Structures are given as structure tokens and as C-alpha cells.
Image (tube, rainbow, N blue to C red):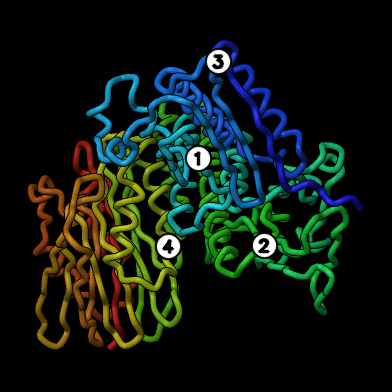
Amino acid sequence: MMKTARRFKKEMSFKSLKGLERQVAKLLKELAAVPFFSNLPKSLVGDLKLGILEGLSNAFLHGGSDARRPARLSLEALPRSIEIRIEDWGEGFAFQAALRRRPSDFEANGRGLIILKNLFDSVQYRKGRPNRLVLVRKLARPKKLDDAIELFNLLQEGIQQLRPKHHLYDRFLDFVVERFNVERASFLLFDPETQRLRVATSRGLSSKIVSKIAVASGEGVAGYVFKTSRPLLVNNAGKQRSGGPRLRRQGYHTSSFVSVPVIASPMHIGEETIGVLNLTDKRDGTRFTANELKLLNVMAAQAASAFRIRDLLDTVKQHEGLNRELEIVHEIQSRLVPEHFPRVGDLEVGGHCQLSMRGGGDYYDVIQVGEGLRGVVADVSGHDVGSAITMASFRAIFRSMVFDPNSPGYLQQVLRWAMHEDLIKLHQFISCWVFEYRADGELRVSGAGHPPLLHYQAVQKKWHAIFSNHLPLGLEDESKPQNKKIELAKGDVLIFYTDGLFDPRMRATGFDKQNFCETIERHLHLSAPELVREIAREVSPHHLALQKPDDIAVLVLRRRP
């Protein structure tokens, strides 16, 4: 088999700006005609085009290029990077001094350097005869967990715009292809009717091959990954391990590939594998790593959550009626709040979410991590579809980060950073508590603008309130992440709740925080789930008596005596 060319170089001269955009478009079309570079993301090609046009325009407008002294362009594409060199014969300019200026200091036609700095990984300039501008765009960007959050924000934008599902699939795959610098990629979805995995979107595969792909559960690599819900990293396709899938590697350039299940929840709680993501043939010829596999798992989880939200919107939109938006809110909220909780040692967990007629964004979640638990209780402002979708986004980011070894305070900061831009745009904010429980009874908690925790200490027979240190998400908070330690002794009860539990209007019906605490003390012999049911029975009549009641979410942690 003939080896695919992995290098492209082209040199051109330009005597004027006439027809410049057409010639640059032709150049990039020639680059895409090389099989190795045929799958470059559209966003990257757009950046290259803008960078070349900006550089050549400056060569004529400021560099003195003309028909006698044409500007020269050289474009060289290699597996790891693309380099653009532009030369002109003008007087040049003070490059370092220009870099120190703020964008607002430039005239309208002098901000090209700032644009280039944002588009390329490296911008260098040599003043001389000729002057030389060198732009470098790396094809393999550093792969960090932040990329997973960026991916979800990208998909979230598509959801808010109610884009079709295939649009989200394309955004997902383009993002992954660019981040991992691969030639070939495919996203397969499971079709319940045919019981086969079929290609939803692909890059670098011929349409003839794509149309023939129909993989049964357990068949080949994709079927194996789908059936087992476990990712697969292979760096030597020539060796087949016992009990593993049968590998078919005809027509590929490298022996390294990854296949990752697309699952909405990393813990598989109430979720199912909906598809498989396959990546192969890195452009630079390197192998996939275990860290890259971990990042892909997180990205796949983020994408699956976004796809599920979009599916849910499609499902509930099919229902007709006057309360259509309310149905959507309730459907999203009720499906994403867990019904069952993991158990660790002698700790019991119980939760209750009482939705009002308006619906909203009250939410809690608890996931087992090693020998302990991690959880969150949150409240999104507002009572509409936007609040419910924001809550679903918050849940997806929390679940994708829950296994990170850092503290609850750090996790809360990540949630703040990840949600900030969307919250600003939507005029929303989120209050929350993030917590971590260890088997020895120690809790670490970090709060952001949420009502105080209520801790009943069994030995002292006293209540203790724990207040949050940070502002709600969506508001600027430059303070360092803080964690508070709580010793949950045997018989102790810790209660997380949203502000609807102690709505001031319920005092007129005879319910307040004191009544609530007395109810808990009367039923300390009950388990956490039973205690939550007793709370619901006590609160419901007062809650429903309000004209426009708020949602209520309550999460109870109790150590058995």
C-alpha cells in the first residue's frame, strides 16, 4: 500500500491585493486535496485563511509591497503544525513594542497583530530586508480537562438554539478531531429498531464505507466497547489479546486507536450506553495515551448528557396542551434527580424534591467515589425551561468532574468557571453546596450562596448551622476555594435544603425552622429515607397552601447510632 504524503508546501508571490481572497481560498483547497490534511476542521481552515489575508494585507498596506516588490507567501503543513511565512520589503515596525500595546490603543486598521496572536500558537516577526512574519498553528493542542467543559458549553449553545441533533453530532466530532489531531473518526449511535450501531457522523471515511457499517452488540471493536461499556486503547493492532474483540485494521496508517463508549453518566446510574466514539490515525504518527483515553471518556460523557437533554426536549415538545413549557420543566427535573442513593458504611442518605406548579432548577446528586461519597445540592434561579436546562448542564459538569481528586472547594470553583459565561448571558445564578464524605465520618463542604446546613449533633442534642463562604455561581468571586470540615458522629443528622423549605410565607400556616427541627428530633429513630418521607408529609400541606410556592429539595445524611 502506498504511504500517504504527510507534508505539503506551497510558495506564492502576490503583486497586488486584487483577487487575494480567491487565491488564498484556492491555496487552502490544494491543501485539503492532500489526503493527510483532508480532514482539517473547518474552524482551523478559517483561522488559516484569516491569518494569511491579514498578513498579506499588511504586507501591501504597511510593508510597501507592489508589482515591483511582490509579497511572498510560503505555507508548509507537517503532521504536528502548519507554518505560514509572509515577506515584504518595507521599512518594518517595532514588533515587541506593538505587542505591549493594548487592543484599545490601536487604530481600526492596526489591530491585525492582536488578531494573529489569538489565531496562532506562535507569531514571530523579523525586521529586515525582507521583513518576515512567521505564523505557526499547532495541529495537536494540549489536551486538558478544561477541554471537556469547553465541549459541553459548545453543545449547550446548540441546545439553547434548538439546533437539530445531527448538528450537535457534527460539533462533537469536529471538536474531538481537532483536539486529538486525528485523520479518521466516527461516532456510532445504537439503533434500537435494528439492534445495530450505525454511523451518525464521521471524518476521514468514505461515504461508501460509512453506508455499509452496521455493527451488532459485541461484534468487532465498536460492538465490544458498546456491549461492555468499557473504553479500549490499542497501541499495537497486530497483537490481539485473549478474550478481546477481533481487530480489523485494513487501510489505516497507524496501529494505535481508541474506542470509547458514549454514556450519559460515568457511574451508569439510570443511564445506558447510547453509542461509541472511535479515533485513529494521529496526524503526527504518535500513539494514544492513557491520559488521552481518560479525557475522551469525560468528553464522551459530556456529549452524551447534551444529546440526552436534546432528546428530552424533542420528546416533551411532542405533547400538546396549555402547560407545554411546564411539562418540559417537570420532565427534565424529575428525570435528572436520583431516586436511589449509594450506601457507604453506616451512612444513610435520603432525598426529596417537591416540584411546584412553576417548576425550576432545584437539584441534588450523590455518587460513590472510592470508599466515600461526593454530592451536591443546588438551586438555579428562575422557573422555566431555561432554568431546567441550566440545571441539567450543571449536573453534567458535576458528574464529569466528580472523580477528580481535588477538594469540594476546587470542584465548586470549576463549576463556577464552567457555568459563568452561560449564567451571565441568561441572567441566572446558582447557589450550591458541594460535599465529600469519608468512611470515618468526616465531611468536607464548600458552599456558594446557599442556605446554611443544619447539623444535629446527637451527643450534645443541639443544632448547629454551617454557613457558606462564597457568592453564588454567576457572580464574580475572587476568593480562594474554602472547605469546612464537619465531624458527623454516630447518630448525627446533616440536612441540605433549598430555600423553598423555609419560605417566610409558610409561617402564617404554622411552619418555620423551629417546627422543622422539632419534627426531626421526634423522628431520630427513623432511617434517612424514612426521615425524608416524614419531612415531606410535614411540609407538603404548608407548601401547597401558598399561592405560588417555590420548589423544595431536601437531602439528609444520617449516621446510624
Q: Residues within 10 Å of mark 3 (few under 14, many from 20)?
A: few
Between disc 1 and disc 2, whose residue precedes?
1
Secondary element at image label 3? loop
Disc 1 designates what residue? 135
Nearer to me, 540 or 450? 450
**Vertical side of 107 occupied by 8: above or below:** below
Residue 226 appears in view:
yes
Q: Position of residue 343 (x, y in %)?
A: 42, 78
Label disc, if present, on residue 229 of the rendered structure: none
Query: CA gap, disc 3 to disc 2?
Result: 45 Å
Q: Amino acid at mark 4?
A: Met
The label nearer to you, 1 versus 2, is: 1
Query: CA gap, disc 2 to disc 4?
Result: 27 Å
Secondary element at image label 2? loop
Disc 3 designates what residue? 68
Q: Residue at x 88, y 56 (%)?
A: 250
Disc 4 designates what residue? 401
List the single residue furthest toward the top. Answer: 18
Between disc 3 and disc 4, whose residue precedes?
3
